[in-house]
């Protein structure tokens, strides 16, 4: 609502929240898919308090860009910033920010969300609609026609009438650019729309308290960053590494009832419950100065709500583009887990098919594993991501429908539960039968077979070690599943290759380290044929060792 003060200025006042806080509810509400800070606070959802970091962001650099993968809480972060800038103190009672903020000034806030805009025309329409809504709110009738000029006039009007500097928040700025990445004409048209809109934020710098822009990918040389060269990129800052996502301590401190329930439902101890959550969803590092890993918040909340460990985040964002990128990378012989990329390319280069690891990092499928002398090392953050990428890639590698692959995985997993290694191998042989022949220049077929074997067992929930070094040499693959250990030697050839694999394992003492574990240990020697049109498992031999 608006009111006219004694000084003749018109002020915008937001009505107080009428719904009471819900505390001590019989059933706790987890914020699955809730991106509104107001809704979380007024409807009694569990909230992991990040408001101290929000306050730091709001009162630090004036113009900021912050990237994180989808569903990591960027929209909730902007919603929290919005409520803070609007001075909505009642929503923050009991949170960390109350020890930091003393004034609680109510400022004009202009928030834009560009998600869903697939073309330049749709983006123009979205900008026009949002501007029209704000122009109605501020009773602006005689407005300019150019989007940038309209934005500048809106900011000036708000500054004059409210007496306060405004905040501009932009969510999913990169959505239109991402979805036209390989359509040069449309991509360029979208960049032109931004060229007519974003300069207003730089021109109005003195009238603004804060500009905060989020996205998944950072298009360094396109649109935004060529215009707003005063933006501070906070994405790699160790100070804000944990502002989106959850730490181990935050999960323990905020979700004790759900953790206890999950443990009880699955028959796990609390230690095992936390260990499974960590293996599945932890491991994100967004800064070289980050002390601890970040858990995927979307997956953690869904797992705690359902009581089940599953791939909630990774597979939900899978796309045809992702599948093509993964296959292209594999066929070219590029490794993803442990890939190295120079700091210049990592921090400054735009995403493209020429830099697939950078795309996978920015979209959350790879994370920072290390940094040394200007070189970043990237790798899979956790089991959820790794198994999902394998699940996307495997059908293409074996040349079968995803449904047939899923059926084989189910059968192999069932056989592992029964310790029926013969059945495991029969189904593995069927899965790999008639694997498409690799074109010249692509990864050798024998490497493709080993990759398929490793992926298959990993997707069955196994712990898999590749190229396991022991005193006598290097084991190709070691599979761990419950009380089972499969020591696998993989060779190219026929029956003689199988015998050679068995002899090598015994002669070099590959099995010695596992016989003392008290588990059921099997030696599995496998041979593959590379004959075009007949590629697959040509033979295998299973020996029970202990």
Image (cartoon, rainbow, N blue to C red):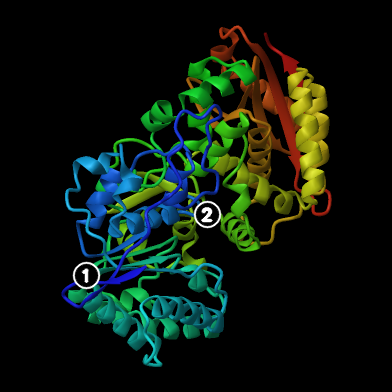
Crowd rating for badge 1 (residues with CA inside 10 Å; few <14, some 14–19, many 20+): many
Viewer-proximal residue, 264 or 531? 264
Q: Are marks 1 and 2 in contact (CB under 8 Å)?
A: no
> Residue extending furthest front?
6
Q: Is residue 418 visible?
A: yes
Name the residue beneath numbered marker 1: 165
Name the residue beneath numbered marker 2: 334
Q: Residue at x 83, y 49 (%)?
A: 534
Q: Secondary structure at mark 2?
A: loop
Crowd rating for badge 2 (residues with CA inside 10 Å; few <14, some 14–19, many 20+): some
- Residue 96: x and y in percent read 27, 39
Q: Secondary structure at mark 1?
A: loop
Horizontal side, residue 261 vs residue 378: left or right: right
Q: Is residue 73 visible?
A: no
Viewer-proximal residue, 38 or 361? 38
Q: Is residue 544 above or below residue 357?
A: above
- Residue 226: x and y in percent read 31, 78
Horizontal side, residue 305 vs residue 275: left or right: right
Counting residues from the start of the chain, the first of labels 1 and 2 encountered is 1
């Amino acid at each position: 609502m608006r009111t006219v003060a004694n000084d003749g200025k018109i002020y915008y006042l937001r009505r107080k929240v009428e719904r009471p806080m819900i505390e001590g509810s019989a059933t706790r509400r987890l914020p699955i898919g809730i991106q509104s800070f107001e809704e979380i606070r007024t409807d009694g959802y569990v909230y992991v308090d990040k408001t101290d970091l929000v306050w730091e962001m709001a009162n630090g650099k004036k113009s900021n860009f912050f990237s994180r993968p989808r569903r990591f809480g960027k929209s909730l972060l902007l919603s929290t910033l919005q409520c803070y800038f609007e001075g909505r103190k009642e929503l923050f009672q009991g949170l960390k920010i109350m020890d930091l903020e003393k004034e609680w000034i109510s400022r004009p806030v202009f928030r834009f969300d560009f998600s869903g805009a697939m073309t330049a025309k749709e983006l123009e329409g979205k900008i026009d609609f949002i501007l029209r809504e704000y122009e109605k709110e501020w009773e602006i009738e005689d407005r300019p026609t150019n989007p940038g000029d309209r934005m500048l006039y809106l900011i000036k009007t708000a500054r004059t009438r409210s007496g306060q500097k405004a905040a501009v928040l932009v969510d999913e700025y990169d959505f239109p650019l991402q979805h036209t990445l390989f359509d040069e004409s449309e991509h360029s048209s979208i960049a032109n729309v931004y060229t007519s809109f974003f300069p207003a934020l730089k021109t109005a710098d003195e009238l603004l308290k804060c500009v905060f822009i989020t996205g998944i990918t950072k298009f360094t040389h396109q649109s935004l960053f060529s215009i707003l060269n005063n933006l501070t990129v906070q994405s790699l800052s160790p100070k804000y590494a944990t502002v989106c996502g959850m730490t181990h301590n935050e999960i323990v401190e905020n979700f004790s009832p759900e953790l206890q329930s999950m443990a009880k439902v699955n028959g796990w101890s609390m230690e095992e419950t936390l260990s499974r959550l960590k293996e599945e969803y932890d491991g994100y590092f967004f800064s070289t100065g980050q002390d601890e890993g970040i858990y995927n918040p979307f997956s953690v909340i869904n797992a705690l709500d359902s009581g089940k460990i599953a791939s909630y985040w990774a597979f939900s964002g899978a796309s045809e583009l992702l599948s093509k990128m993964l296959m292209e990378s594999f066929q070219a012989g590029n490794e993803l887990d442990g890939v190295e990329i120079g700091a210049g390319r990592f921090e400054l280069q735009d995403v493209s098919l020429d830099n697939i690891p950078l795309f996978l990092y920015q979209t959350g499928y790879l994370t920072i594993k290390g940094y040394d002398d200007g070189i970043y090392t990237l790798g899979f953050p956790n089991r959820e991501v790794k198994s999902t990428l394998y699940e996307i890639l495997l059908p293409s590698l074996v040349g079968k429908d995803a449904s047939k692959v899923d059926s084989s995985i189910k059968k192999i997993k069932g056989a592992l539960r029964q310790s029926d290694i013969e059945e495991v191998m029969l189904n593995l042989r069927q899965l790999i039968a008639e694997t498409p022949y690799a074109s010249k220049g692509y990864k050798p077929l024998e490497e493709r077979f080993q990759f398929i074997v490793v992926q298959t067992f990993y997707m069955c929930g196994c712990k898999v070690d590749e190229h396991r070094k022991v005193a006598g040499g290097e084991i190709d693959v070691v599979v761990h599943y419950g009380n089972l250990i499969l020591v696998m030697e993989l060779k190219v050839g026929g029956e003689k290759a199988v015998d050679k694999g068995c002899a090598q394992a015994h002669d070099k003492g590959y099995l010695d380290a596992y016989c003392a574990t008290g588990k059921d240990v099997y030696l599995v020697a496998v041979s593959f044929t590379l004959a075009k049109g007949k590629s697959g498992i040509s033979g295998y031999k299973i020996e029970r060792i202990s």
